[in-house]
Image (cartoon, rainbow, N blue to C red):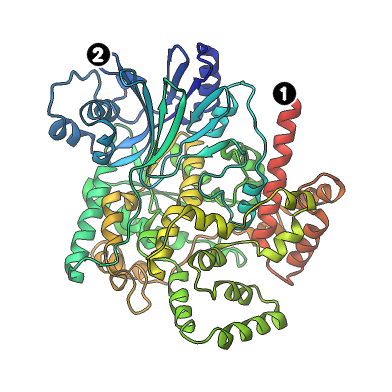
Amino acid sequence: MCGIFGLLNRNREKIDRSILHNMGDSIIHRGPDDSGYFIRNNLGIGMRRLSIIDLQTGHQPILNEAGDCLIVLNGEIYNYEYIREHILKKEHHFKTRTDVESVLHLYEEKGTDFVHDLNGMFGLAIADFDSKNVYIYRDRMGIKPIYYYEDHDWFIWASEPKAIIASGLDLDLEIDYESIYFFLTMEYFPGEKTPYKKIKKLAPGHYLDLDLVVCDFKVEEYWDSSFPSEKRGISFNAACEEFMWLLQDSVKLRMISDVPFGCFLSGGIDSSVIAALMRRIHNTKIKTFSLGFGTEKEMDRFDELEFSNKVSEHIESDHRSWIISGDEVRESLDKILWHFDEPFGGGFHTYFVSKMSKEKVTVALSGLGADEILTGYEKHLKMRFLRYLMFFPEFTYRLPVKMLHALTRNKKIEKLSEILTKNPYSRYVGWMRVFREDLISKVMTGEFRRRTGISITEYFSMTWDVSGMDQDDSISYLEQRTTMVDDFLNYTDKTSMAHSLEVRVPFLDHRLVEFMNSLPLSFKTRHREAKYILKHGAEDLIPTEIIYRKKHPFFLPMKVWIKKEFKELITSTFNDAASTPDSILNGDVLLKLLELHNSGSADYSWEIWLSFITLRWFSQLKKTRNNQ
């Protein structure tokens, strides 16, 4: 696990080594154990290393025997031993035991097709000085990030935007207000979007081909989530057996480590199954970690420690838990914002459970991704019901819903009116969005509105293709390529690496994802029981009460924190916005939302939170630029 970075001077001027050091120093948290730098003329490549495998000789960058190929890699390749023993047919002289060197030699033999043999999470760069190309890859599911920047003089890439900015070069860091609008709507920056116009994300399953001769690049796709219209012909019992075998093998591969490892344990079925499989494979006590918010009445619905403790007792794990307070979150806010490089919605729980875990382990497994591949969310069931309404003429259901919303102003009815559409993008965005369009138009100032272009629905339809998919597959596809990547995996990477902790996600082994995407919906959801195949397969692993208890989404207690621990800070921030002529958000409107929320008249938890975080981020950015 590392942070990687590099840059190409398009004017063919030699790279100053201090630039690479500045970039590396900015992300030392990603790799506190080692650093490495390479410069050849107008190309510079560097890394910071968190040692996981081959602690002694795993220094990067790694050069091949001839010295004409170089690699840096952030992440882990779980099948590297298989690659080394079974795929690499030619003789190679290995200088290390790392997974990284196996990838380099695999590239030498297979060229850019090497990536199809990798099972892992990765952001990597290979410089081929013979062909005069640099190839920069992001893993299939988007677990590890790659950001890049380009202008007339520079092409720069890194694991985090802060490394690009820390280069000290005269870069164009103009804010992308359309991206900020997308964030306020969806709670994350979708697709290639970041807060900066010229800093973009490389999409999952893509690689960037940087030509060192012409100093230009192109982006190519090498993998995408696929949902065949003809589902696999297999019995449920056979599918369940194969699914559980793939999951256990995925867990086993992700336990390869030369440092201590453990597991996040929320008390839900996903992380509980991962922990139970780890116990079965390891055949000794494993370390598990849970986060809670307290059992007092107002916090009880957010807390799952009761269930994580039951699972821990069942598998006899070495368990630690931490009840986090709103005050602790508030005091860490600016530090977390710095690690994100952008406004953010969730991620606090992963930040704090990672902080606790790092005291005992360097690697932790997580149950993240199960809902996205197993149709585990409530929206799948509700949208399936709504689909039947659309067999009737539109006026028979749309007009009554609009009238009901006009009378009640209920947020759930408002959401219902948005998702009653045959457009799959409008349906998905309508379900997932935080800010409704009429409200966000009031919260944005006039100048902000003038700087936005297309709608979020238009952006989704331009970026992801769900044509030919049925409703359920289109929802799962969009979940796997948008919310999971740009929200959940994004905050998991940033908040865990803030503490130099590597988090591995067994449910997102691409073999498992491909298998589940090929199965009929009835194997995933049956009789209104979501994740049915997992629940059936887990009956000999964890207690039945954990398997079949009502789904308990992991919600942060924002509603409570806004009224208590964050009340003063949020009020002050909104007052500042109201009195600042060039504020991007309308402070008077936000203060009204805050008043309604705190009085109990309405729940605007996430609208208030996203607005507050956006203003806080802009304030930090302004201070940083004024000090430069």
> Which of marks 1 and 2 precedes in the sequence?
2
Q: Look at discs 2 and 1 and give the one toward the viewer.
A: 2
**215 versus 437 height, above or below:** above
| Contact between labelled residues 1 and 2, with CB atoms less than 8 Å apart | no
Q: Position of residue 567 (x, y in %)?
A: 74, 55
Circle on res. 181:
none
The amino acid pointed to by label 2 is: Ala
The amino acid pointed to by label 1 is: Gln
Residue 210 horizontal side relative to residue 516, left or right? right
Give the structural element (helix, strand or loop) at label 2. loop
Residue 4 horizontal side relative to residue 587, left or right? left
Which residue is labeled 2 in the image?
66
**416 versus 118 height, above or below:** below
Which residue is labeled 1 in the image?
628
Please tell me in which quadrant of the rendered image residue 137 appears.
Answer: top left
Q: Badge 1 local density, few (<14 within 10 Å), some, or many (20+)?
A: few
**Foreground: 496 or 180?**
180
Q: Quadrant of the C terminus?
A: top right
- What residue is shown at x 31% (from left), y 55% (from top)? 513
Residue 596 horizontal side relative to residue 287, left or right? right
Q: Position of residue 292 (x, y in %)?
A: 52, 55
Q: Disc 2 to disc 1, how far (Cα)?
A: 43 Å
Q: Residue furthest front?
A: 214
Give the structural element (helix, strand or loop) at label 1. loop
Q: Badge 2 local density, few (<14 within 10 Å), some, or many (20+)?
A: few
Q: Quadrant of the N terminus?
A: top left
- What residue is shown at x 39% (from left), y 69% (from top)? 472
